[in-house]
């Protein structure tokens, strides 16, 4: 079973003690987060081998991230440390329906300053999947580090997974974010996209029209479309499968989508998937249902990695 490598931001999510606006919250609890980091955590919690490529500040928050990733089995040997900037922080407010509001302290964060020349080809020798998101695709060095990682992973036969994970407050304007996402989409074999992001990325809110647009990219093999409490879809060029969500009370949705894609990629790695056109509808439905259950379990607890179960169920 080959390993998963993720590249991008690793940060501290400050989870509120109660729901409401950030300015009204009396206390926050720190949890290790950052979407690519969460995906590594989900993959490792299930027993897979994963490694995180990022850069952290030389500060206690960076120490916390390294310690907690190691505790769940994530390889931290590819994480750099710098004195040029602090570890990124994100304060999260939870609305009564479980949705989130973010306030980031990342101007710049240490992760943003990672240079492409810091990456080494041998890191990717046993890589089955490289996963990345859009938060680190802004106009700073980490964007080029992503291009380098994708090229190196591809040269070693890995599949590329992209979750745009749109966070507009981190961009100078929405157009810059949209341009970056559309620039990197053609590089991905697997695209994970949410119902809140579909129109922003593809220009249409209609799933079937969006599917045609996404699969215009010859590299794209599979699309995962998540709809929160309304369920999720897995799409290939020939197959479309829907799975409803489990009915649970959402305590905290932080990292839910990351757990979904992390658990999905774990199943693919476990079964040595290289070409999704060879997957049957039965197989893909099994993956989708298990990842939906994984996600449902995680949102019943606070935090991201700390909320992920260590087994898959249906």
Image (cartoon, rainbow, N blue to C red):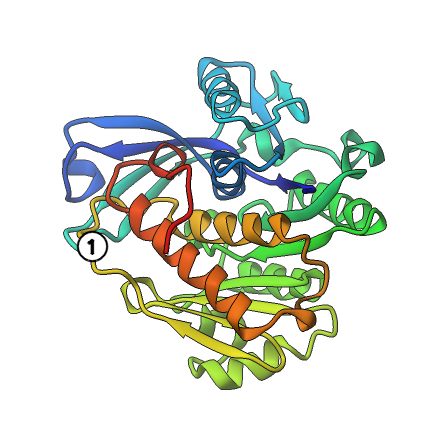
Q: Is residue 299 left or right of residue 57?
A: left
Q: Nearer the viewer, residue 150 or 116?
A: 150
- Near mark 1 (Cα within 10 A), the count class, few <14, some 14-19 or many ≥20, is few
Looking at the image, is 57 positioned above or below residue 136?
Answer: above
Q: Is residue 137 visible?
A: no
On the image, which quarter does residue 52 sit in? top right
The image position of residue 279, as x and y in percent, is 63, 69
Q: Residue at x 54, y 33 (%)?
A: 108
151 to 13, vertically: above or below: below
Residue at 62 percent across and 19 percent down: it is: 81
How far across and down, in percent of the image, does residue 64 sit? Answer: 45, 18
Q: Which residue is mark 1?
A: 248
Residue 294 point in image, percent of width and height: 38, 49
Of the pair 239 and 225, the residue shown nearer to us? 239
Res. 244 visible in picture: yes
Horizontally, residue 231 falls left or right of residue 23, namely right
- Name the residue located 42 percent from the left edge and 41 percent from the top edge: 311
Query: Left of 126 or right of it: where is 214?
Result: left
Q: How many marks?
A: 1
Query: Which quadrant, please, contains the C terminus?
Result: bottom left
The vertical placement of 39 against 63, above or below, is below
As drawn, 221 above or below 89? below
Quarter of the image with the N terminus is: top right
Q: What SS does tag 1 mark? A: loop
Residue placed at 48% from the left, 54% from the top? 165
The percent position of residue 20, horizontal first and vertical second, equals 15, 44
């Amino acid at each position: 079973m080959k390993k998963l490598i993720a590249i991008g931001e690793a940060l501290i999510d400050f989870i509120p003690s109660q729901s409401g606006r950030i300015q009204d919250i009396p206390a926050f609890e720190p949890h290790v987060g950052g979407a690519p980091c969460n995906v590594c955590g989900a993959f490792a919690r299930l027993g897979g081998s994963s490694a995180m490529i990022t850069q952290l500040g030389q500060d206690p928050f960076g120490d916390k991230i390294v310690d907690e990733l190691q505790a769940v089995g994530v390889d931290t040997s590819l994480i750099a440390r710098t004195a040029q900037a602090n570890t990124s922080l994100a304060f999260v407010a939870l609305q009564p329906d479980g949705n989130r509001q973010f306030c980031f302290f990342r101007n710049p964060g240490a992760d943003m300053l990672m240079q492409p020349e810091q990456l080494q080809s041998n890191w990717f020798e046993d890589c089955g999947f490289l996963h990345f998101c859009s938060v680190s695709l802004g106009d700073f060095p980490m964007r080029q580090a992503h291009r380098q990682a994708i090229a190196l992973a591809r040269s070693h036969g890995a599949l590329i997974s992209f979750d745009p994970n749109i966070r507009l407050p981190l961009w100078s304007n929405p157009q810059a974010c949209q341009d970056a996402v559309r620039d990197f989409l053609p590089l991905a074999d697997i695209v994970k996209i949410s119902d809140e992001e579909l129109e922003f990325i593809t220009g249409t809110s209609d799933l079937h029209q969006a599917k045609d647009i996404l699969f215009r990219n010859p590299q794209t093999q599979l699309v995962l479309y998540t709809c929160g409490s309304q369920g999720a879809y897995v799409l290939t060029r020939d197959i479309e499968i829907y799975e409803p969500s489990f009915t649970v009370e959402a305590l905290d949705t932080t990292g839910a989508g990351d757990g979904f894609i992390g658990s999905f990629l774990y199943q693919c790695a476990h079964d040595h998937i290289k070409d999704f056109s060879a997957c049957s509808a039965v197989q893909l439905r099994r993956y989708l249902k298990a990842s939906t259950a994984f996600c449902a379990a995680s949102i019943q607890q606070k935090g991201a990695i700390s909320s992920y179960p260590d087994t898959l169920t249906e």
